[in-house]
């Protein structure tokens, strides 16, 4: 997800015939298609490598749900904050990998990471994939599904609320960065 937003511009700088929300939702489809194609390649690769999956259909569904949730989040950050959104996405990625059982069990980490763990979406994404790969424990599975859906809805609502108001400020900031020659 992070790579695809680095390759394609999510913000339109300059005069437009469209409102900021129209631009946001119009370009979101492209990012979702790219994310789903990346997920499809990942799924095919997992099956090709012979990874044993408890429930293949559930695995595929979980991967696509996680992709949509994270792509909406990352695209929204990029759409709202431009290059600052890219930086936020990378910071979130690093923080989540180190905090959400991605490297070490959360119980052996310091108190900061243990406190942060339940609030990060990758915690629930990892739980979903574990359920699909190793066998389903339905309460944990549905908690993960609800967390991913809640993340999608919350991200869209926050973006819809602040996009129109924040877009002019963000455009001026992006244009100043572009004019400076630093980015």
Image: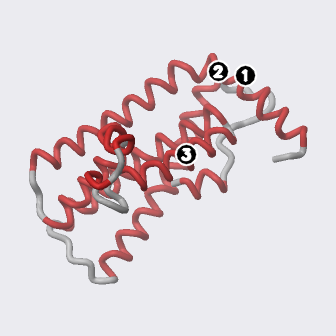
Report x, y in % for residue 155.
Answer: 44, 32
Across and down, in percent, residue 132 comes to 20, 61
Q: Left or right? Give the position of 11 relative to 140.
A: right
User: Is 162 situated above or below 126?
Assistant: above
Q: Is residue 148 visible?
A: no
Residue 62 shows in the view: yes
Q: Residue at x 43, y 47 (%)?
A: 70
The CA distance from mark 1 to mark 3 is 20 Å
* Residue 100 vertical position relative to residue 170 in the rendered view, above or below: below
Residue contact at pointers 1 and 2, CB within 8 angstroms: yes
The residue singled out by tag 2 in the image is: 166
The mark found on residue 50 in the picture is: none
| Horizontal arrangement in the rendering, residue 90 relative to residue 134 (left or right) | right
The residue beneath circle 3 is: 89
Label 3: how many Cα within 10 Å (few below 14, some 14–19, many 20+): many
Quarter of the figure with residue 147:
top left
Which residue occupies the foreground of this view, 21 or 45? 45
- Residue on which disc 1 sits: 169
Residue drawn at 26 percent across, 78 percent down: 51
In the image, residue 174 lies at what x, y percent?
77, 34
Q: Secondary structure at mark 2?
A: helix
Tell me which label, 2 or 3, sits earlier in the chain: 3
Question: Closer to the N terminus: mark 1 or mark 3?
Answer: 3
Q: How many residues crowd mark 2 within 10 Å: few (<14), some (14–19), many (20+)?
A: some
Q: Foreground mark, 2 or 3?
A: 3
Give the Cα distance between marks 2 and 3. Answer: 18 Å
Q: Secondary structure at mark 3?
A: helix
Q: Give the image quarter of residue 102.
A: bottom left
Residue at image point 46% right, 62% down = 37
Q: Is residue 164 left or right of residue 132?
A: right
Under tag 1, what secondary structure? helix
């Amino acid at each position: 997800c992070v790579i695809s937003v680095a390759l394609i511009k999510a913000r339109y700088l300059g005069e437009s015939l469209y409102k900021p929300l129209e631009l946001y939702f119009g370009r979101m489809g492209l990012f979702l298609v790219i994310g789903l194609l990346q997920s499809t390649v990942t799924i095919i690769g997992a099956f090709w490598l012979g990874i044993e999956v408890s429930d293949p259909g559930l695995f595929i569904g979980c991967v696509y749900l996680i992709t949509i949730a994270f792509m909406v989040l990352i695209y929204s950050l990029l759409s709202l904050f431009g290059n600052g959104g890219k930086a936020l996405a990378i910071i979130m990625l690093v923080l989540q990998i180190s905090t959400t059982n991605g490297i070490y069990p959360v119980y052996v980490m310091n108190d900061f990471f243990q406190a942060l763990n339940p609030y990060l979406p990758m915690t629930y994404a990892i739980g979903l994939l574990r359920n699909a790969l190793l066998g389903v424990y339905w309460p944990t599975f549905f908690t993960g599904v609800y967390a991913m859906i809640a993340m999608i809805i919350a991200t869209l609502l926050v973006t819809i609320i602040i996009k129109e108001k924040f877009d002019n400020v963000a455009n001026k900031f992006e244009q100043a960065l572009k004019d400076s020659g630093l980015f």
